Image: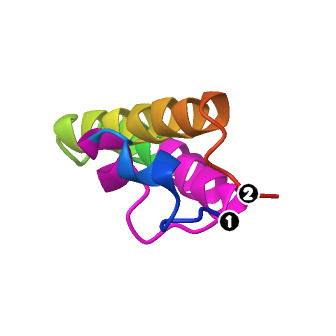
Amino acid sequence: MINKADDKWASTPFWIKAGLLGIRSRKVALLFEFLSVSTALLFGILSYWYLPAIAGLIFFASAYWYAVTIRWADNHDLWNT
């Protein structure tokens, strides 16, 4: 869980707060990261025949953002256990 009333959360950069918007636990954040990678792979495969490749790139960028956000929160002890 993230304690959003804590001083650590108040000093967190905007891009971290945006990445964790509505996410309260690390497990849910990891699930979003996994789903983003899975969707990117699916769109990447389908873009060979049907979809434009930009859709897969957007989901890969989303997965990368989640990965960086989760690691930043790990390194700055935002997750309360």
Q: Which residue is label 2 attached to?
A: 80
Distance (Cα) linking label 2 and label 1: 5 Å
Indicate whether residue 20 is drawn in magenta.
yes
Quarter of the rendering containing residue 61: top left
Q: Residues within 10 Å of mark 2 (few under 14, many from 20)?
A: few
Q: Amino acid at mark 2?
A: Asn
**If you read the primary sequence from the N terminus, does the residue marked by circle 2 or circle 1 appear first?**
1
Instruction: Give the residue at x 64% y 50%.
Output: 30
Q: Which residue is label 1 attached to?
A: 1
Colour approach in the figure: rainbow
> Is residue 48 in view from this perspective?
no
**In x, y percent, where is residue 81?**
82, 58
Q: Residues within 10 Å of mark 1 (few under 14, many from 20)?
A: few
Instruction: Give the residue at x 72% y 59%.
Output: 27
**In x, y percent, where is residue 74?**
66, 35
Q: Amino acid at mark 1?
A: Met
User: What secondary structure predominates along the stretch shown in magenta?
Assistant: helix
As helix, strand or loop, the secondary structure at mark 1 comes to loop
- Range of magenta residues: 14-38
Check whether the beta carbons of the residues at disc 2 and disc 1 lie within 8 A of each other.
yes
Indicate whether residue 25 is drawn in magenta.
yes
